[in-house]
Image: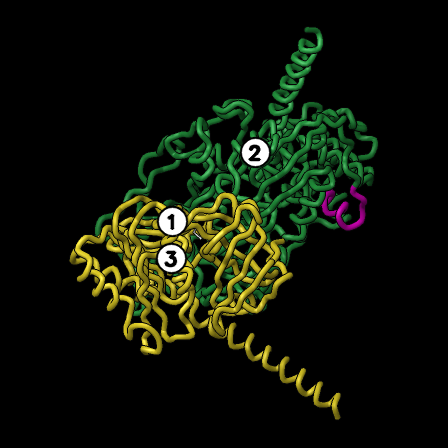
Amino acid sequence: MFKIVDKEVLAPTLSKLIIEAPFIAKKRKAGNFVIVRATETGERIPLTIVDSDEEKGTITLIIQAIGKTTTIMTQMERGEFFLDVVGPLGQPTPIDNLGTVVCIGGGVGTAEVYPIAEALKEAGNRVIGIVGARSKELVILEDEMNQVCDEVIVTTDDGSYGMKGFVTDALKNVMNDEPDIKGVYAIGPMPMMRAVAETTRPQEIKTYVSLNPIMMDGTGMCGACRVTVNGELKFACVDGPEFDAHKVNFDELIARNRTYEDQEKMSLEAFLQEQECKVHDAQTEQYKYKD
Amino acid sequence: MRKQNNTNTKTNGKVNPLKPSERMKIPRHLPIEQGAEIRISNFEEVSQGFNFELALEEAKRCLECKNPVCVDGCPVNIDIPGFIQLLLEKDYQAAIEKVRESNYLPAICGRVCPQENLCEIVCLLGKKREPVAIGKLERFVADYEMAHGKFTPPQKAEPKNQKVAVIGSGPGGLTVAAELAQRGYDVTIYEALHEPGGVLIFGIPEFRLPKHIVKEEVERVKALGVEIKTNVIVGRTITIDELFDELGYESVYLGTGAGSPNFLNIPGENLSGVYSASELLTRVNLMKAYKFPEYDTPLKIGKRVAVIGGGDVAMDAVRTSKRIGPEHTILLYRRSREEMPARVEEVHHAEEEGIEFQMLTNPVAIHGDENGWVKSIECQKMKLGEPDEKGRRRPIPIEGSNFTIDVDTVVVAIGQSPNPVIQQTTPGLETTKWGTIIVDEKGATSREGIYAGGDIARGGATVIQAVADGKRAAVSIHEYLTQVREENKKKAEQVAES
Ligand code: FES
């Protein structure tokens, strides 16, 4: 069992959890992830390790409530336990001193690109960060990114904060201003990563994306996470999750990721309804009590 | 350790009043089974095995050969006539203990061993009639103990104060652990998944091997003092060298299993609706997707399913798919029925359950609809050519014979390749060109103190082969650690002298 030693709610559906996992904390490198099974009936969920503290033996995870399992996970509190946490998984990001690099995070992807930005900075790069979100309250880790980047641009789709537009709009500006970008690291929703890949392709700027296909074991055992990269079959959990963005078959991956769309929706709705009923029951209970 | 192959428990026919000629006249008994109609809509065990009456009647058939060839046919040399005699004496507890002397996982092996190719194929009774149902008898005594008996862990040898790490908690790992714990070693099993049992838990379906049986056998290994640590991926969470250098293990057994699923490398294999058998089975067995939405892990099996392959895993996959409830379930295999490597019993069960077999059929492409979902599979007809090195006739494509079958789900069950994580993170560990770990006849790898067996060394093995490898390696590890102990003692004495 893995204890939740701290929790912070970053946005309504976004929680940051600090988990006790000493072995993983010791081994983990930027780009690694873990698989978490929170409860007996829960799915195995892959999550990027955002940060770790070897001394305290903890790792930091940021979880967005998307389906039923992740909703339950974001609702768990300090002092509770995850049943299973396994890792560190995946290939770490190769970190070299390249010169000027751009690190792009979209939505919860910012949590995933942050450790890479940090490692790249430590290696001596000039790091430009781009943090994108739908609107102001969904912008995360801006301060943390500021600490490890030489410059950070925030974009929101609705213009409620920072620059109005998409991360690719900001990226185009950066590409105009900076003649010699040596690498772009983009993590976020699949369409965003594809758009970044298309933006950098004409200038052939090396671009890496961290893919989030459907996963189960995370150890190369099931092949659920298979993706086509440069025409070859790859397992994202062991060969990735990072790949050369210009070689990834995004269309195929986006279609595959929709495999369980209906079931996930159904399961989440049923769960939320059940929760509402409980809240409702609790309220009526209280009401009766007062009565 | 108790002696194995101890065949002198025989009571020379005292218990069994029948003459050999009379015994031979009794036809082989069939186990109680759930009818095909009913079982295709549940995940409960198909075979219920023998009840007391059937078991006793079947046991009477054993000829008690002086030279029991069945014992040699068994990869772990269970004293088969010995335990059958005890069964006949109605000393069921002694019977199961006799089995456990040679095989610590009898409830599992009694269910999944291909006895028809091992102990039963050599049974003398089988020369003229049908062999004794040894497997079902083994299962009977094991089940008896779980239901009515009392398990007492076998006696352990003096503590050796030496630590052994076993990587993987499948049948091989559990066996090594049980054998070495009985010899007095401190054994820890490291398991990558969240539940111990390896292929017994994630691979073999509930209807062939109920998970409570696996759990119970695992508990019996733990009862010997073996510790099982789940959620540890050796090579990632911790390396082999760290186990030696930092955690003080003196020997390591690698029983990590088959690893990574193979794909056909045909167009359309990454469409939605295409699964590897490993994914399908793990979703259902380990993650309980058949209980969705009570369990959160989903599985989407459409109306028409095609499973590709002819081995045991293909049978498990096709029968699992069937139980999820599609209208039509087809098995595609590129050779003919005779070449199918799956157990006869399982092929027979699959047929009873209404699975359509399409032999000499080789998939060449999977076609998708506008949403990226499987809509059909294109196949080529095959014919059989000359036998290959293994003696199986090679399938040859028939030009211009392509045809398509409308399906919305495809399951690929064409085997696995070794997972490379341990090989990549353990310097000096030699592998074959297929990635399997090289071992000698004692199960020793190229690195001192490291042993391996089962699928990771053989490429593809059965549960009982993994158990046999585990037993062999346990003997070797015991020898090795004894030598280490003696050398340390000598060194200590020398230091004391000087
Ligand atoms: S998640 Fe199962 S192989 Fe990658």
The chain coloured yellow in the image: A
Q: Residues within 10 Å of mark 2 (few under 14, many from 20)?
A: some
Q: Is residue B327 visible?
A: yes
Colouring convention used in this rendered image of the protein: by chain
Give the CA separation, mark 3 to mark 2. 32 Å
Mark 3 chain = A
Query: Label 2 vs label 1: CA separation?
Result: 28 Å
- Across and down, in percent, residue B430 comes to 43, 27
**Residue type (three-letter) at the residue carrying disc 2:** Leu
Q: Which quadrant would residue A250 be assigned to in this image?
A: bottom left
The residue beneath circle 3 is A113
Count the marks. 3
Indicate the position of residue A278 as horizontal and vertical percent values: 64, 80
- Specify the principal SS of the magenta part: helix
Label 3: few (<14), some or many (≥20) within 10 Å?
Answer: many
Residue picked out by circle 2: B243
Q: Which residues are magenta?
A: B140-151
Front: mark 3 or 2:
3
In this rendering, the answer to whether B466 lies above or below B201 is above
Instruction: Report the side of B315 relative to B149 (left or right).
Output: left
Q: Which lettered chain is shown in green? A: B
